[in-house]
Amino acid sequence: MTCVEKTPPTARHTPGPWDYDMDYIVAPDPNERHPDIYIADIANSDDEGRVASLEQQDANRRLIAAAPALLEALFDCVEYLECNRADAVSGVEAVGHQTSILLDAKRYRRNNLIS
């Protein structure tokens, strides 16, 4: 089966890669005026105490910062499955074929981007 490679949908979010700096999620400044720009923040205080624990705040930082890479990996998985759905073992092959994506996820975990 031949498969036409699809262009992923145009992202409306701030392009990655994202990272975190203290309580802020940051991304490269598209206008190149600053090293990065703040795109989100992790609440660490509230007058009513409605904030996640410090451990959860750290996990949330890492998960949010990894979002663009995870979204790209998801698009890759979907494209592969769509191109190979006629194959009776496509699900098994998809797991094998997407090993590099899984290794990326492990790299994020190893670099403490996700736990």
Image: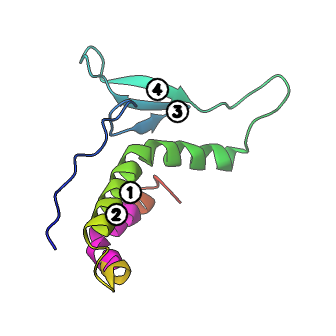
For badge 3, the amino acid type reads: Met
16 up-or-down from 111: above or below: above
Between circles 4 and 2, the one closer to the viewer is 2
Instruction: State which tag comes first along the sequence, 2 or 3.
Output: 3
Identify the residue position indicated by label 2 in the image: 77
User: Which one is nearer the viewer's eye here, 91 or 103?
Assistant: 91
69 up-or-down from 50: above or below: below
Residue that appears at 45% across and 23% down: 38
Identify the residue position indicated by label 3 in the image: 22
Identify the residue position indicated by label 1 in the image: 74
Q: For this view, does 98 lie left or right of residue 56?
A: left
Identify the residue position indicated by label 4 in the image: 39
Q: Which residue extends farthest bottom?
A: 88
Q: Are marks 1 and 2 in contact (CB under 8 Å)?
A: yes
What is the CA distance from the residue labelled 1 to the residue labelled 3? 28 Å
27 up-or-down from 71: above or below: above
Q: Are marks 4 and 1 in contact (CB under 8 Å)?
A: no
Q: For this view, does 75 lie left or right of residue 114?
A: left
User: Which one is nearer the viewer's eye here, 92 or 2?
Assistant: 2
Q: Quick one: label 2, few (<14), some, or many (20+) residues within 10 Å?
A: some
Between circles 3 and 4, the one closer to the viewer is 4
For badge 2, the amino acid type reads: Cys
Q: Quick one: label 3, few (<14), some, or many (20+) residues within 10 Å?
A: few
Q: Which span of residues is magenta-colored?
A: 94-107
Q: Secondary structure at mark 4?
A: strand
User: Which one is nearer the viewer's eye here, 78 or 74?
Assistant: 78
Give the image location of residue 107, x and y in percent: 36, 62
